[in-house]
């Protein structure tokens, strides 16, 4: 009787584990983070399926790194304060990525690989710098900088390509 119970338990555990793995592979991913204060840092990695990630930081010395793999992607970063820095890497599928920075020493880097792509960076004050790399599929980009030092670079290869860089002063 104990042997049958042990075997039945083992089979039940294996069948449950067999069901859990595919469920995780179909994860719906989502993250929303808000930070306020000094030396805010976020590093997020999402793998597979319907990702999305919204990050808002307010204060000083803010740093964001987002890495997303395959499927629906997303990412929205809003930074307000000083020493704003964001890095976004997206691989495959529907991509997107919007970064808004307002303050002192803004830097943004984004890289998108494959499928629908689009970026859009907006920086407002002081030493603005933005770099965007897009490889393959329908591309897009953006980058608008207003005020003080400006540096912007968009590199695109393959498919739709569209580029827009507007720099100015207020």
Image (cartoon, rainbow, N blue to C red):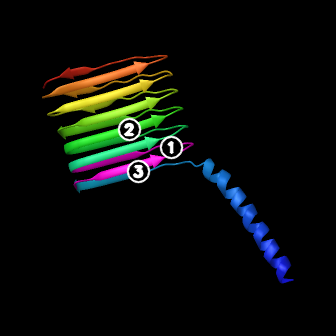
Q: Earlier in the sequence, mark 3 or mark 2?
A: 3
Query: Would you say 169 lies left or right of 136 here?
Result: left
Outermost residue on the bottom side: it is: 1
- In this picture, is 33 found above or below 135? below
Q: Using residue 19 as the reference point, say whether residue 69 is left or right of it.
A: left
Q: Quadrant of residue 74?
A: top left
Q: Residue at x 20, y 31 (%)?
A: 128
- Specify the segment rendered in magenta: 38-59
- Name which residue lies at 25% across and 48% down: 62
Residue on which the image places disc 3: 32
Quick one: label 1 or label 3, which is nearer the N terminus? 3
- Camera-near label (3 vs 2) is 2
Q: Which residue is mark 2?
A: 88
Q: Which residue is mark 1?
A: 51
Disc 1 + disc 2, Cβ < 8 Å: no
Q: Nearer the viewer, mark 1 or mark 2?
A: 2
- Quadrant occupied by the N terminus: bottom right
């Amino acid at each position: 009787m104990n042997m049958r119970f042990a075997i039945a338990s083992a089979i039940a555990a294996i069948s449950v584990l067999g069901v859990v793995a595919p469920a995780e592979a179909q994860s719906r991913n989502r993250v929303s983070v808000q930070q306020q204060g000094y030396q805010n840092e976020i590093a997020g990695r999402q793998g597979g399926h319907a990702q999305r990630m919204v990050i808002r930081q307010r204060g000083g010395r803010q740093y964001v790194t987002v890495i997303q793999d395959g499927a629906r992607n997303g990412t929205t970063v809003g930074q307000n304060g000083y020493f704003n820095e964001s890095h976004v890497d997206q691989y495959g599928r529907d991509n997107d990525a919007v970064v808004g920075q307002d303050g002192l020493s803004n830097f943004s880097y984004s890289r998108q690989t494959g499928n629908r792509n689009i970026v859009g960076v907006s920086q407002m004050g002081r030493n603005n710098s933005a770099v965007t790399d897009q490889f393959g599929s329908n591309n897009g980009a953006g980058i608008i900088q207003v005020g003080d030092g400006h540096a912007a670079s968009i590199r695109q290869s393959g498919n739709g390509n569209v580029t827009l860089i507007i720099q100015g002063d207020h």
